[in-house]
Amino acid sequence: MDETGAGTFCRLFDRDVVTQFAYGGTGANVFALGCLLRPAEAVVCSRVAHVTYDETGAAERIIGTKLLEVETVDGKVTPRGLSSVAHCSAVSITSNQQS
């Protein structure tokens, strides 16, 4: 990345930041999950979540995380859905609220 791009993000966040660009959405999502998760952690998601349904397990293959698919109501994870994975000791839950 050139200095113009790096400087733009530093000014936007009013601090020094490291900016990484990814080619395509799947690469960006896998990179982001890899930054958020520690080894042996998992993501709880809907069976129809983009990360599992459209990206066909890229996160599992590339960073070794487990995508724990749960039953949902209208695609939204509920406490009932979470109960099916409550036995897991290291679960990180991510949420993408779309309006």
Image (cartoon, rainbow, N blue to C red):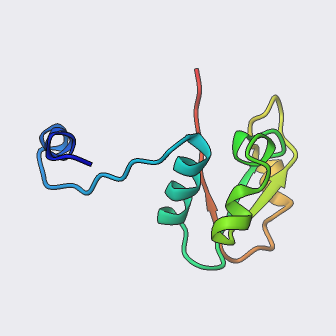
**Residue 61 position within the rendered picture, expressed as x and y whole percent measured from the top left:** 73, 66
Quarter of the image where one finds residue 8: top left
Q: Is residue 3 left or right of residue 64?
A: left
Q: Is residue 74 above or below residue 1?
A: above
Q: Number of marks in the image?
A: 0
Q: Is residue 16 above or below residue 73?
A: below
Q: Is residue 41 left or right of residue 45?
A: left
**Residue 4 position within the rendered picture, expressed as x and y whole percent measured from the top left:** 15, 40
The residue under the point 76% across, 43% down is: 78
**Residue 34 position within the rendered picture, expressed as x and y whole percent measured from the top left:** 54, 64
The residue under the point 83% across, 50% down is: 81
Query: 94 or 11: which is nearer to us?
Result: 11
The residue under the point 62% across, 46% down is: 26
Q: Is residue 80 above or below residue 85?
A: above
**Residue 96 position within the rendered picture, expressed as x and y whole percent measured from the top left:** 58, 38
Q: Is residue 14 left or right of residue 95?
A: left
Quadrant assignment for the C terminus: top right
Q: Residue furthest top?
A: 99
Query: 6 or 80: which is nearer to us?
Result: 6
Quarter of the image where one finds residue 91: bottom right
The residue under the point 14% across, 55% down is: 16
Q: Residue furthest front?
A: 2
Q: Is residue 75 above or below residue 88?
A: above
